[in-house]
Image (cartoon, grey):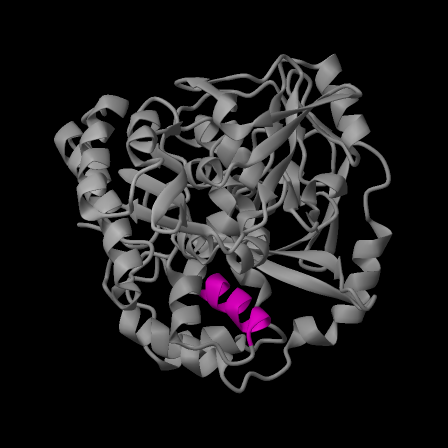
Amino acid sequence: MIQFLLNQELRSEHALDPNLTVLNYLREHVGKSGTKEGCASGDCGACTVVVGELQTDDDGREHIRYRSLNSCLTFVSSLHGKQLISVEDLKHKGELHSVQKAMVECHGSQCGFCTPGFVMSLFALQKNSDAPDNAKAHEALAGNLCRCTGYRPILAAAEQSCCGKQPDQFDAREADTIARLKAIAPTDIGELNSGDKRCLVPLTVADLADLYDAYPQARLLAGGTDLALEVTQFHRTLPVMIYVGNVAEMKRIDSFDDRIEIGAATSLSDCYEALNAEYPDFGELLHRFASLQIRNQGTLGGNIGNASPIGDSPPLLIALGAQIVLCKGETRRTLNLEDYFIDYRVTARQESEFIEKIIVPRASAEQLFRAYKVSKRLDDDISAVCAAFNLRIENGVISDARVAFGGMAAIPKRAAACEAALIGQPFNNAVIERACAALAEDFTPLSDFRASKEYRLLSAQNLLRKYFIELQTPHIETRVTAYV
């Protein structure tokens, strides 16, 4: 059985199909049809809902953290122990919520189909920021598409509803909601079971290891932003899933003198502060990693584990010399991330083995790390090419080089010939040009709908040139770049 709050209503479910998304649960099982399906792939934001989770600050204060996410990519099992808020829940005692009023008064709703998603994104923005600037508003709404091109009044609604906000019914009920969430906090393994399909929800790494050993055919579910597409886009059935999002040990971020350890189930949003503090270019890239809804849900471990050749984080992590800890039963092994990827969607992971955490070295003054992303859109788009450069230069000579790319091969991959052309050489234009030529030895990219093979190779070479120019003239630096 799983339990969660549907606004303030306690829901206990045990016989649901684990492949059921929150979107379809709301529309078909609860009769709340305000949440819309636009794309069923997490791209349009029409299905945005908000999930509240109980959090405890460092000072011991308990509060509810509200986050927007795409209900079309969220399986119901991930709601265990949380609060789900949909657009119908905002109206209170016959009065529209302030974000709804702002959408009306600023004429932010045109055809209206996308409006519920915008409203929920604005609601989450209002909850998480007292007076958001324009950049924050754009970030919060970047995952919501309006085909009527009504963004100006919607941004005006964001300003009206979030600046000088007043307490609402959720604030008034916060203490009661906290108490109710504590009362349903999971204490044992949860389960959804429809007979031929099941999803198990462990709470500890040990429980996860035991379950995965018992069900080696199970699919691990973290954020689900990639896995759910198998259901929503390819119409496949997932017979057994194990949801890792309630394993607290795998959602920790621990900092040490020489490294940062990030639990594999940590959301990309939660990774941001730690990674941005060490590597600002990593932080910049995370701002362009899909949408805020996806970052709130997708995990760093999932972005590695799905072994996509165009995942944004692996090239950066490889260039930084990151490692992963793999767990199977009571056995753990540490692997350099670059050795995890073997071939297209093929990894070094053994049966019943899972990524427990990612180890990222701390930054040093000698490192010159930069990352670049080439995509057709600035926001909410997949890379055509993602590049990461990490050089050490001593007395004008390149003493070490780690260069990695995504989108250039069947796996995220280091550029060995390029690195060899750099190491031991002076950091000058002639050496950079030789290293650019060496990239043609490292990669034979494919052509697809995102880019041709010629465009990819030329882009990779130009990004290395860009890296050199920016380090020579840092005042013109533009970190994570989009090309149209």
The residue shown at (34%, 32%) is 419
Location of residue 33 with respect to 29 vertically, above or below: below
Residues shaded magenta:
119-129
The residue shown at (86%, 40%) is 187
Location of residue 113 with respect to 416 vertically, above or below: below
Q: Main secondary structure of the magenta part?
A: helix
The residue shown at (43%, 24%) is 235
Rendering coords of residue 137 (x, y %) = 42, 70
The answer to whether any part of residue 33 appears in the image is no
Residue 293 left/right relative to 430: right
Rendering coords of residue 170 (x, y %) = 67, 71
Residue 128: say if magenta. Answer: yes
Location of residue 199 with respect to 392 vertically, above or below: above
Rendering coords of residue 85 (x, y %) = 60, 58
Nearest the viewer among 13 and 51 is 51
Q: Tell me where residue 140 sits by quadrant.
A: bottom left
> Outermost residue, left direction?
454
Residue 226 left/right relative to 460: right
Q: Tell me where residue 456 sits by quadrant.
A: top left
Location of residue 373 with respect to 1 vertically, above or below: below
Residue 244: say if magenta. Answer: no
> Outermost residue, bottom direction?
164
The answer to whether any part of residue 132 appears in the image is yes
Where, quadrant-wise, is the N terminus in this rendering?
top right
